[in-house]
Image (cartoon, coloured by chain):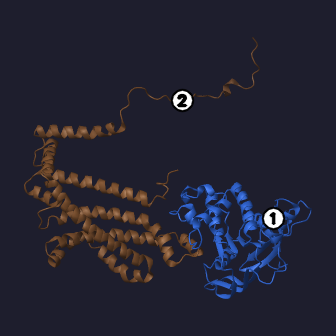
Amino acid sequence: MNAHTPLHPLPVTPAVRLQRVVRQFGDNRVIDGLDLDIAPGEFVALLGASGSGKTTLLRSLAGLDSIEGGRLIVPEARSAVFQEPRLMPWKRVWKNVTLGVRDGDARSRATKALTEVGLAHRLNAFPTTLSGGEAQRVALARSLVREPKLLLLDEPFAALDALTRIRMHQLIIDLWRAHGPAVLLVTHDVEEAILLADRIIVLKEGRIADAIPIGLERPREKGTPTFNAIRRRLLELLGVDSGRQPSEDGQEVRPFRGLALAT
Amino acid sequence: MTSPPVLHNPADTVRTIEITPSVARNGPRVPGFVLRLLSPVVILLLWEIASRAGLIPTQIIAAPSEISITLWALTASGELAHHLLVSLQRAVLGLSIGVAIGVVAALITGLSKRGEVVLDSPMQMLRTIPSLALVPLFILWFGIGEFTKVALIVMGTTFPVYLNLFAGIRNIDPKLIEAGNTLGLSRRELIWHVVLPGALPSFFVGLRYSLAISWLALVFVEQINTMSGIGFLASDARDFMRTDIIVICLLVYSVLGLLIDGIIRTLEHYALAWRPSFVKS
């Protein structure tokens, strides 16, 4: 897909622009002067250990939290999918999807969105009768029906089983191609980030430790030499010592050596 | 005949059991409810026999046959229906007012911080007063007429609804509120689509308590200067040592209790159709 090849350098108007953004709780700066641009239609994954500020950043972008300093520009049309589906248990699936949608024929829009995620047959079901994967797909449909220019995903696949997760990866790529929103995926799964993203941002102590463009063709496969090389580099950045084993392509893995890693 | 080669020690042979399909018992089956009825019927029979033998005097408790004859007489004369209707009117009136006050107060305190600051502590103070302890004060204020009776039922039924609905509103999963916010719901939409449906199960819990209390309160308030109502019927019967009528009043209470429970269940089934226990797979 040409429309979604990584866009570097960035075009004139990014979909998201952060300038010296600060978010702090008391004296604790969770996000510490962050600069980041996301191009329209770009798929960015945000990696980081727990406490690195990645979820905090996403919440600020979603408008759930305020910021204490800097500038933050986001599209007006944006939506979020969280780790839990967060569906209203008392509303049938299609009502959940169109909750808060005020214009147009709600029912037909819900049907269209649910068909896209393969759940047209569960239109009238109550959320409690859905499996974890189905519920998460409803949450995706609920996001898409709003035609977002920025789709925020906060570990949306973390609670799913491995097989469902693989299907969801494919689905998210298909939906992204069909609708073309900028995507910010927060994850702690290094492989997931490499499989999906145009660019991976590694967050450490509220700052960007590194930004790695992923030029791999889609669909991507795990375990190729390039994939493994990126994976090792990311694990290093995240401070996971992969044991200095010589890798398949003969290079020795460097252990993590602190923060001086910016490209 | 040559024996097959021994592959393992016979001592290792696995002990097996065979699981056979279970066979349904033949013959006529006694329905479950008949079996369930059996022990109450036996108890009634023993009671009747003991009464007739003079082991249980009528002043202690009347015989089942005597009770049923009185029940028939009271029903046929319309006396029971009259008292029942009067009691129901009092209960429904008191309950409606009590529930309405409870709901309004819970919405005010539950949905606004300021409302909680202003209204919650007086409600909590009033809540701790047993409503029956207010009888003397209410009689002084409102006299011994209908007003006092209904007011006491209102006092008793307001707080269960208030407390449960308030807790229900405050215990909504904050993640759902957050989801509502990310979906761009206005405050009014958030209350209507998220908060109130989420608090509905708690409201029903409170309503059940209130119903039980309204019924209980009748027993007491209908002893205050009255000539009608189930409570009057019972206290009047006490004065004449009519244990048969007292038992009938108790039966009326329990049947009505069951009936009201059934009504609430039906309401819940309709209003809370989304709950896992109600969802048909």
Q: Which chain is displayed in blue in the rendered image? A: A
Please, what secondary structure does the residue beneath circle 1 have? loop
Q: Is residue A120 left or right of residue B166?
A: right
Q: Nearer the viewer, residue A92 or A112?
A: A112
Q: Is residue A246 left or right of residue A107?
A: right
Q: Chain of mark 2?
A: B
Residue under the image location 13 percent in, 40 percent down:
B51
Residue A216, quarter of picture: bottom right
Residue A230 x/y as whole percent: 84, 67
Residue B77 x/y as whole percent: 12, 51
Crowdedness near tag 2: few (<14), some (14–19) or many (≥20) residues, C-alpha within 10 Å: few
Residue under the image location 49 percent in, 54 percent down:
B279
Q: Which chain is displayed in brown in the rendered image? A: B
Q: Is residue B1 left or right of residue A29?
A: right
Which amino acid type is marked by label 2?
A: Pro
Please, what secondary structure does the residue beneath circle 2 have? loop
The residue at which mark 1 appears reads as: A242
Which amino acid type is marked by label 1?
A: Ser
Q: Are marks 1 and 2 on the same chain?
A: no
Q: Which mark is residue B21?
A: 2
